[in-house]
Image (spheres, rainbow, N blue to C red):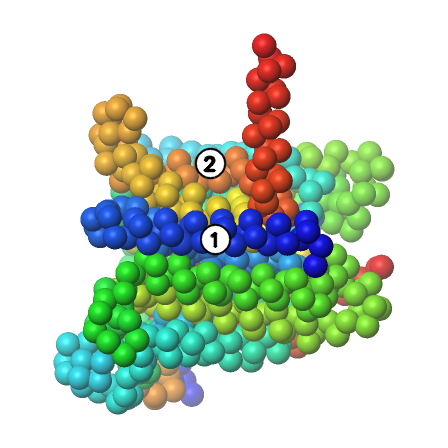
Amino acid sequence: MDREKRNHLIRVFVAIALVYGLVAVLEFTLRPTSIIFTVLRKGAIYSLVAVSMNLLNGFTGLFSLGQAGFMLLGAYTYAILTMPTAVKESERVYRYYDALIHFDTGVLAGLIAAGLIAAVFAFFIGLPVLRLKSDYLAIATLGFAEIIRAVCQWDVLGPLTNGANLLREFKDLSRITLPFSDIPFPPTLFVFIVVGICILLIVLLINSSYGRAFKAIRDDETAAEAMGINLFRHKELSFVISSFFAGISGALLAMFQYTVQAQQFRTVLTYEILLIVVIGGIGSISGSCIASFLYIALSEWWLRGLDMGTFLGINAPDLFRSGFRRLVFSVIIMIIVLFFSRGIMGDKELSYERVRSFFKGRIHRKENAR
Amino acid sequence: MADFFHQNLSYFLSGISVGGQYALIAIGYTMVYGILRLINFAHGDVFMCAGLMMVYLSSSLPFAISIPLVLILTVILGFAIERVAYKPLRSAPRMSVMISAIGVSYLLQNAALYFTGGLARVYPEIPVLSASVVIWDAPTRVVTLVTPFLTLVLVILLSLLIKHTKIGMAMRAVSVDFETSQIMGIKINKVISMTFMLGSLLAAVASFLYFTNYASVTPTSGSMPGLKAFVAAVFGGIGSIPGAVIGAFIIGICENIIKGGASIFGIPGSGWTTFSDAFTFAFLIIILIVKPTGLFGEKSVDKV
């Protein structure tokens, strides 16, 4: 390994360690109800879905809009599996049905099962759907996501999914403990660790020979096929893996929200994630992560005043009423889509050199201006 | 058999009526796709906006003014969306335009959410249309009877326009070959604007008929009819107007037959309404796999 590569790796590890250290410090110093934790947790969860969607849309060139459906599968699998058996058998959650499953699993098993169920469904959905091209694929995946949502709410499946009612009292973020003990584990750090591992796996995949095959398919299907890449197998692989991680992020979202209802996983959720991917730059993993945190911070924190009557010291309750935040937000998104279609990162990744040259460029410009 | 029809007549009637409404929306999808090869995700939301405009305008204006005003404003909205969100991306990859369309859909829904405060708005009762009638013992509204005929009249007018006018000829030319028609001196932008305006006009008409039946408008009430109309357009062969109309009627009728599942098939269960939505997409996927070009679609050939 040459020196440059080694330096690069060291920098990456230091940066990641810093992020995790910061999260841990925040977790032990700030009040747990602080808005920062909401932003960090939800931002991390959205990063994972955004990266998983980017694997499909940005790296394999499959325009899929089924992410919300796979998140729903993950969220439901996790909630049903980790809900304590005593709760299932009481009438607290399953009020109108007798629960079908009479066992419960731990958090990790629940998370992995969430991913696996989503992946299994993705495998069978992918068999017919991945033979379609661009916009037909988009509509078909969107359709499947809607079918999954409809079936989840069907009352015949009530003993399993509780019909259209809420699922709650499963092992959410407030109930995480260190393995084999009752010591509570810091929840934000937990989300970061799970998301970090998942994104690391996706990065490793993208940099492997499979990842290169995905990119070849994205750039030119016919040429990739001529180079001996099995189109269908690779598309299916990308679809299944992306859905696996979407399932895990759905489970994390369930943990974050404390409740799950099929109604939350509408097409709008997929649209939001797609827009995050676009803002971050299609084909950039770090871009997707940055965009997720920005998006969540803006919508949950910085622009909150737009909904509450006062923003930047201006008090106008008639203008700044509920919903204004999302309106402003969608205008910003349209501006990005129309005028900065490459997003924050384009298809490049964040690196020390880029950050340095970015700041250097600014200093230069300032000096020149003088 | 006659008895069976008699018992379930209300489902068939509302199926035909909803089918007509989907048909009017589907034409907007299919025409835009025919010319720009773009799924206009915002079209369902334009339809919803037309419904909301009617709610607000009719509260202060008489119907004789508010109905034409809604038509005009929806046409302007469709025109504006095309100019602002799609025209700058004419040479961009198809995916960017589609993302822009999704962005517009998101914007319209959020705007509607802001203006309505997230509440369902009661749709005004348009005289004549919302009067109730009884046909063969099935109570229904006049709009149910008017819709299929109005749809057919509008479709015939539209086909005449496309067949016999200059702008119609230009539209056909552009949908066959975008670049060549440009070389032949057709003003592409004018044709595209016209397409969007026609689509929006029909969506506005559909909104009068649809919301009279459903009685309330919410920010998301455009997305489901929009998606279903799109499925209808795909079924008929996207780009083909008669195909879209036939597809819309088939989907409307099937959907309502499923909604009446409990009495029609004799299978109990209350989940039939959710399944009527799922059916539409299952149908879409089957079509896309069995016959991706739809009923009347042209076969496309990939060139390397």
Task: Check disc 1 and report the residue beneath it.
Answer: A16
Q: Nearer the viewer, residue A32 or B167?
A: A32
Can you name the residue that lies furthest to the left here?
A: A91
**Residue A177 coordinates in the image, percent (x, y):** 26, 70
Label 1 element class = helix
Q: Nearer the viewer, mark 1 or mark 2?
A: 1
Identify the residue at horizontal 62%, vertical 50% (top origin): A7
Check the image and report above or below for A338 versus A248.
above
Quadrant location of the C terminus of chain B?
Answer: bottom right
* Image quadrant assignment for residue A9: bottom right
**Residue B196 coordinates in the image, percent (x, y):** 59, 42
Check the image and report above or below for B158 versus A316.
below
Please say if the residues under marks 1 and 2 sit with CB atoms less than 8 Å apart: no
* Image quadrant assignment for residue A93: bottom left
**Residue B291 coordinates in the image, percent (x, y):** 68, 73
* Image quadrant assignment for residue A262: bottom left
Give me the C-alpha separation between circle 1 and circle 2: 30 Å
Quadrant location of the N terminus of chain B?
Answer: bottom left
Q: Chain of mark 1?
A: A
Q: Label 1 amino acid? A: Ile
Identify the residue at horizontal 71%, vertical 68% (top origin): A209
Task: Check disc 2 and report the residue beneath it.
Answer: A332
> Does any portion of residue B28 appear in the rendered image?
no
Q: Chain of mark 2?
A: A
Q: Nearer the viewer, residue A140 or A237?
A: A237
Can you name the residue that lies furthest to the top here?
A: A370
